[in-house]
Image: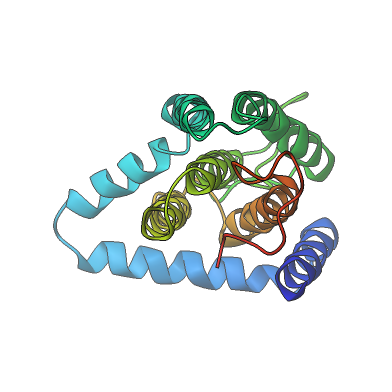
Amino acid sequence: MAVPAVAVVVLLAVSWQVGVGGPLLGLDRWVRRAVHTVRHDVPSALPDRLGHLLSDLGSGVPAVPVLLLAGALAAWRWRRSRSGYWWLPLPVAALTAGLIPLLVVPAKSAFARPGPLGEPLTPGQWGWYPSGHTATAAISYGVAALLLARASGPRAARVATAVAALLASGVGAGLVWSDFHWLLDVVASWCLAVLVLWSLDRWLPRPGAGGRQASGSSLR
């Protein structure tokens, strides 16, 4: 229970600070200045290209297709294992894809936080908090890894989890490096993803479990 508890506390604290313009936002400004200093000292354009590439991995394409493909592959493997709920990964993947904007868009509209470049929001424009690309990457790749982990052995499950964590971290880093988001925008979306993944991991049965909820967690 410590993992979701920490995620909730961090999410509430960050949201409060963003909402009131509190001193924690100084961390955002400090990180941005540090990133700009590093970018100025690196003559190569390669890190900037890498930052944009990583940021793009948090777009709906490719993140959502990867999620849906993982759901289909997991369903196929569950069926081979003669699980009574072999079809379950398919609606889980589809519902997850629809859940992401429901989590992010209302918060963006409510907080209406300007981005790092300081451009004023136009009427009806969403803000930058929390980061939609980070949420899309962390939740899509995370749920994809969870579905595949349920249908794989321990070693493959660890690999899938590690890949998902690296992708989610890389997208967040790319967004901050490229000046697309503040650090706290990214942190908030990571917290949202942790809560979604923890809840799903607790609820989703394992193949061959006869539809009963499995005890324990596969994301360790």
Quadrant showing the N terminus: bottom right
Asked which colour scheme the image uses, the reply is rainbow
The image shows residue 180, relative to residue 173, as above or below, that is: above
**Quadrant of the image occupied by residue 55:** top left
Q: Residue furthest left?
A: 44
Q: At which x and y percent is residue 131? A: 61, 45
Q: Is residue 147 left or right of residue 55?
A: right
The image shows residue 83, relative to residue 30, as above or below, that is: above
Q: Is residue 117 visible?
A: no
Q: Is residue 167 left or right of residue 44?
A: right
Q: At which x and y percent is residue 178? A: 39, 49
| Residue 80 vs residue 175, the one in the foreground | 80
| Residue 38 vs residue 203, the one in the foreground | 203
Quadrant showing the C terminus: bottom right
Q: At which x and y percent is residue 82? A: 55, 31
Q: Is residue 199 left or right of residue 152?
A: right
Q: Is residue 44 visible?
A: yes
Residue depicted at 44% across the width and 49% down the height: 171
Residue depicted at 67% across the width and 52% down the height: 201
Q: How many marks?
A: 0
Residue depicted at 83% across the width and 56% down the height: 19
The image shows residue 140, relative to residue 97, as above or below, that is: below
Q: Is residue 147 left or right of residue 65?
A: right
Q: At which x and y percent is residue 185? A: 63, 54
| Residue 209 vs residue 13, the one in the foreground | 209
